[in-house]
């Protein structure tokens, strides 16, 4: 099974008459961990919504595994979406369901499986994120870091071709954030054909996990490449961003 590359071709995106992203041309390499970096409000989450297919481009296209996502038939579109896992910022767990039932949701929605098999699948991925002992707890009984780990377990239970993570370390203390980075690296090692896309402005996380980086500023891309190239860049904004300088 080949990993899926994600490509943006002349992508312009926004909401109604408001344009957020303009003429994005970039590739997120197949089977790598790509980090979409930028300041608050620059369009990172909007780009993520385009990949997931939650919003249609104003113009241009998004290619997933070489196929134009928004040119697919409804059945093909749904099939592609089912091969994507998403970790939302707050975990997005349902408060009325136990952790195991939350994690099993993607399987229960699309497959006809017995309750026993669903639970076994949920326990398997909860074990991977260190939460097997909390399978029968409810989201309000867990810490923020545990909810994020549970959200990651739910995102990978279908073994998706693309894993999308929106600010996975936001709101976490440095130690818990480092553990989340280790989990993402572990997921990447375990699922060799999975393409990971992480939206972040966490520089410590960036340096820990990034294999490819796309930097967005003012709705456009100003950098695409390796961490080493980013660190060596002479671009004033990139230097300011990477050094956490307030500027003028």
Image (cartoon, grey):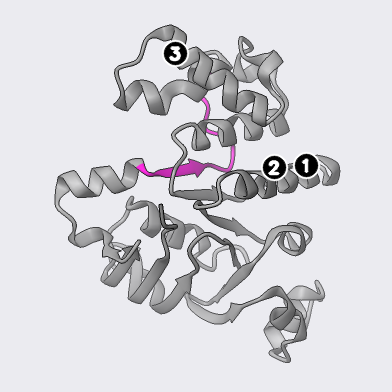
Mark 1 falls on what kind of element?
helix
Prevailing secondary structure class for the magenta stretch in the rendered image: loop
- Badge 1: residue crowd in 10 Å (few <14, some 14–19, many ≥20): some
The label on residue 183 is 2
Left or right of 235 on screen, residue 108? left
Image point 16% across, 47% down: which residue? 74
Image point 66% across, 47% down: which residue? 184
Image point 57% across, 32% down: which residue? 153
Left or right of 115 on screen, residue 214? right
Q: Residue furthest right?
A: 175
Q: Which residue is mark 3?
A: 117
* Number of numbered discs on residues: 3
- Label 3 vs label 2, nearer the camera: 3
The label on residue 179 is 1
**Nearer the N terminus, badge 3 or badge 2?**
3
Q: Residue furthest front?
A: 1
């Amino acid at each position: 099974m080949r990993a899926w590359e994600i490509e943006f071709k002349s992508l312009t995106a926004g909401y109604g008459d408001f344009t957020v992203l303009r003429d994005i041309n970039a590739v997120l390499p197949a089977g790598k961990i790509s980090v979409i970096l930028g300041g608050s409000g620059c369009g990172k989450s909007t780009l993520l919504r385009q990949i997931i297919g939650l919003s249609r481009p104003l113009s241009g296209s998004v290619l997933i595994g070489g196929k134009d996502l928004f040119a697919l038939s409804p059945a093909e579109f749904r099939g592609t979406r089912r091969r994507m896992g998403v970790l939302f910022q707050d975990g997005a767990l349902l408060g009325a369901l136990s952790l195991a039932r939350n994690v099993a949701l993607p399987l229960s929605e699309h497959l006809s499986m017995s309750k026993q098999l669903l639970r076994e699948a949920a326990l398997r991925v909860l074990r991977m994120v260190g939460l097997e002992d909390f399978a029968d707890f409810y989201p309000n009984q867990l810490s923020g870091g545990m909810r994020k780990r549970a959200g990651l377990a739910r995102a990978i239970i279908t073994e998706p071709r693309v894993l999308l993570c929106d600010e996975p370390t936001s709101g976490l203390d440095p130690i818990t954030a480092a553990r989340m980075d280790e989990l993402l690296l572990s997921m990447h090692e375990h699922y060799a054909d999975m393409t990971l896309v992480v939206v972040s402005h966490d520089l410590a996380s960036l340096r820990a996990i990034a294999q490819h980086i796309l930097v967005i500023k003012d709705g456009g891309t100003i950098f695409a490449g390796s961490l080493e190239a980013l660190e060596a860049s002479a671009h004033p904004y990139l230097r300011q961003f990477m050094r956490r300088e307030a500027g003028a």
